[in-house]
Structures are given as structure tokens and as C-alpha cells.
Amino acid sequence: MITPNMHYADLKDSYLFYNIAGKTKAYLAENPDKKLLRLGIGDVSLPLCDAVIKALHSAVDDQAIKENFHGYMPECGAPFLREAIAEHYKKRGVMLSSDEVFVSSGASDELGDILDLFDRSSSCLVIEPAYPAYVDANVMAGRKIVHLASGKENGFLPEPDEATQADIIYICSPNNPTGAVFSREQLQRWVDYANEKGSVILFDAAYEAFIEDESLPHSIFELNGAETCAIEICSLSKTAGFTGTRLGYTVISKSLVRNGMSLNDMWVRNRTTKTNGVSYIIQKGAAAVFTDEGICQINDNIKIYKNNAKVIMEALDKIGIWYCGGKNAPYIWLKCPNNMGSWDFFDYLLKEIQVVGTPGEGFGACGEGYFRFSTFGSPEDTKEAAERLVKLLS
């Protein structure tokens, strides 16, 4: 009889969004006349920008013409897109060769797949509260997980602990769920720590486009020494609305070597073995994101989400609730009032003002007592939700 991967039995129930959906559905069944305002889901609400749509249509038309038709694409990404991404980094002072850029079907996929580069005996460090998939992917592989708690006292931006040893280090900045962003000095300490310990940082930069304070790093490769200790995983989901279109990219420097093995070469072999690449149509649409026209248009959309954040933050300021995030990130992380638990606060907002957010407990034990609001909803719903919050909690 075949033996399944028994590490799946070690996974905790994925109850967070299941419970949110269940509670919301039950409430609506009992109160069909109520209007729910959803500030919980981290999905975008604005459509793809015009430059991307035009590029997608053009690429579809190419597939109808024999001379322009594309079948299998290069597994690591089309040269035109890899070069566009490398040029994008160059504008921020980060020099990459195009073959250090790998095109993927999205950051979520890549965050799981990238673990193929590391032996299962490798340990991983997760700064919590954290995106749950960081933990689950490593539980599935049977790895030892080191949980580094963060909290209000350090702005949810902990520093490395010399006494802690981990082979893989997850850092998400701007962070999901807390919206906190590491400064250059803080992130440099993590880079120095990783190089000292021989660890590899998996840097999740899915929300870098929301940084408006240019003293903050958009990429870990802006820091000295990052090329020898970091892998950066990026996404167009929140940057350009590709949540349903699916495209991301990963940067692995040729200088990243462990035990005499180049992780760049290893990832080329992995991708050429396990994938057939991302479709030509999607890659053409993605390339339009990095044009002057595309950048201007996606920034217009991001401004709308950032204004949503401003509306929520102003409401929390009026109420006098502590929070972080919002200014340089699309998430706002707040302390539940009156020492309420995360789920208690969820139930309270749902029943009293029909506003749905995300209980912090779902992102790890140190998220208990906190709550996450997403700013990806419509401006109209966000404004109404903020008004309801002020009325309820003032």
C-alpha cells in the first residue's frame, strides 16, 4: 500500500477564511435585507489598466496569425519580459541581468515551488503574524519551523536574534497582514544576519508598489550583500490587478551559492523540468505594465486603493484605535478595542454594522487581539464602512 505524505496530518485546519465565509453566509441568511461591506478579502476590485488590455488583445490576435503564433514559451520567461523587469529594477539602482529574472504564474505558486531548492532538513524562520502559506508549505515538507513573534512594541518589525538559527528566512515587506515596512537599516540587519549565518532570505515583495516613502526599500536587492543571501518573489496581482490573470516574477542572483551550488542554475533546471512556462498572451500583457503608459495607469489605480487606506486611517484616528500599515501598504492592522478577541471583534462588527474584516488570530497566535482591514474595496463601500466604524466605536 502506498504511503501518503503524513506531514499533511500535521497541518492545522484552514479555518480562517472558511469560518469568515460561513459566519457571513449565516448572517445574510438571517438578515437578507442588510448590506455587507467587505474589507476582509485581499483581492483587487479595479479592472486591468488600458495598456494591459490592449497588449492582451494584441497578443490574442497574434495567435490567430501563423507568422505571429507562439506555442511553448521559454520555461524561465520570454526574453522581452525578463528584460523589461530587469530594466525596471535598474531604474531603482538595482543592476540585474535578465537571466536572473524568472517569470512565474504568480507569487503564491512561486513561494511554494521555491522550496524545492532546499533540503527537507533545512529549518525555516517565519516572522508572525504571517501569511499562513509560509507555515503550511513547510509543514507539508516536514521542516522544522522557528516562529519569531512580533508585536505592537516593535511595530511588528522584529530584529534578528543571534541565538536563533534558521536556514530559510521569510520576510514580507510591506507585510501581509500588518502593513508594516522594514526600513533600510532594519532590513540591512537581516541581510547581514543571513550572510553571517549562511541562511537564505525568501523576500516576499508582493506589495512594494504601495510604498510611497522613498526612504524605504522596494527591493531587498537595494541592500548591500543581498545578492549573496536573498531570493525576491514579486507579483503583479496587487501591483497591476493580475489576481485573476496570474503572473509574478522571481529574482535569483548568480552570486547566490550554497555548498558550491548556484541557486540560479538550480532554479533554471527546476523550471525547465517542472514547467512549460507562462502563456505568451499573459506575458505580453505583463510587459505592458512596465511601459511608461502602463506604470502611469497602474499608479492611478494604486492611488485609489491608497485613498481607501487614508479614509480608514482617518476613521481609526477619530476613534483613537492603535494601528499600523496603510500609508505604505494596502493593509491596516489594528488593535481590537476594549481588549476584545479577534473573533469577538469580527462578530461584533458583522452584527452591529455589517462590516467584514479579517481576525488577526488567523495569521498566527500573536495576531490574537488584532484585526486586518483590506483597502482593495470600492471607494464608496470603504467610505461607508469608515462612517459606520466611527458611529459604532466613538
Image: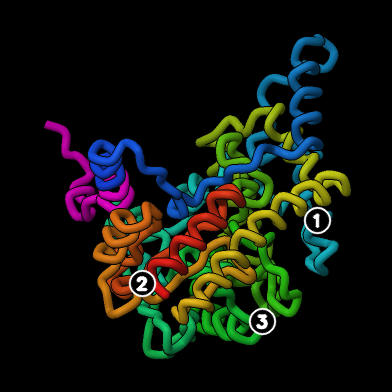
Along the horizontal axis of the image, is 222 left or right of 311? right
Q: Position of residue 173 (x, y in %)?
A: 57, 69
Considering depth in this image, is 59 or 137 the residue closer to the camera? Answer: 59
Q: Position of residue 284 (x, y in %)?
A: 76, 33
Foreground mark, 3 or 2?
2
What is the CA distance from the residue labelled 1 to the residue labelled 3? 20 Å
Residue 236 in sight here: yes
Q: Which residue is drawn at the image coordinates 80% and 64% (left, top)?
A: 95
Q: Which residue is drawn at the image coordinates 66% and 51% (left, top)?
A: 239
Q: Is residue 86 above or below residue 127?
A: above
- Residue type, label 1: His
Span colored in magenta: 1-21
Residue receiving disc 3: 184
Residue receiving disc 2: 370
Considering depth in this image, is 20 or 70 the residue closer to the camera? Answer: 20
Considering depth in this image, is 253 or 344 the residue closer to the camera? Answer: 344
Q: Position of residue 195 (x, y in %)?
A: 56, 79
